[in-house]
Image (spheres, grey):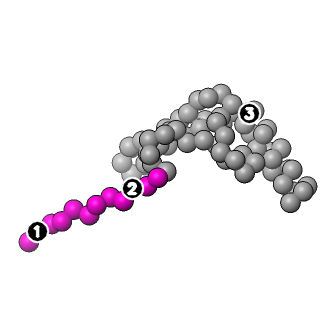
Amino acid sequence: MSVTATPVPEIPYLDGAAKRLFIGGEWVAPHSGRTMPSINPSTGEVIADVGDADADDVERAVAAARAAIDDP
């Protein structure tokens, strides 16, 4: 019996670039410029580095959400 490895599909999200925050319909860099690892819990591997939101980012996101509610 032979075993054939299944090729792993390329996933554009996992291109190695740090991931930004989605605020107000746009992908934006975190205010602090910091990132943090997103870790696969089953393997402990880092999947990607993602934006590390701080209070300023949260305020921007809340303001964007309120604006969207007020003027959809």
Residue depicted at x 43% and y 55% = 11
Q: Amino acid at mark 2?
A: Glu
Q: Quadrant of the C terminus?
A: bottom right
**Mark toward the start of the polypeptide (3 vs 1):** 1
Magenta-colored stretch includes residue 26: no
SS for callout 1: loop
What residue did someone put label 1 on? 2
Tell me the CA gap for discs 2 and 3. 34 Å
Report the residue marked by disc 2.
Answer: 10
Q: Dot 3 corresponds to which residue? A: 55
Give left or right: position of 20 versus 18.
Answer: right
- Kind of residue indicated by mark 3: Ala
Measured from the top left, where is residue 71 in percent x and y? 90, 56
Range shown magenta? 1-12
Up the image or down, 11 lies above or below 21; here it is: below
At 36% across and 48% down in the image, what residue appears?
43
Magenta stretch, main secondary structure, is loop
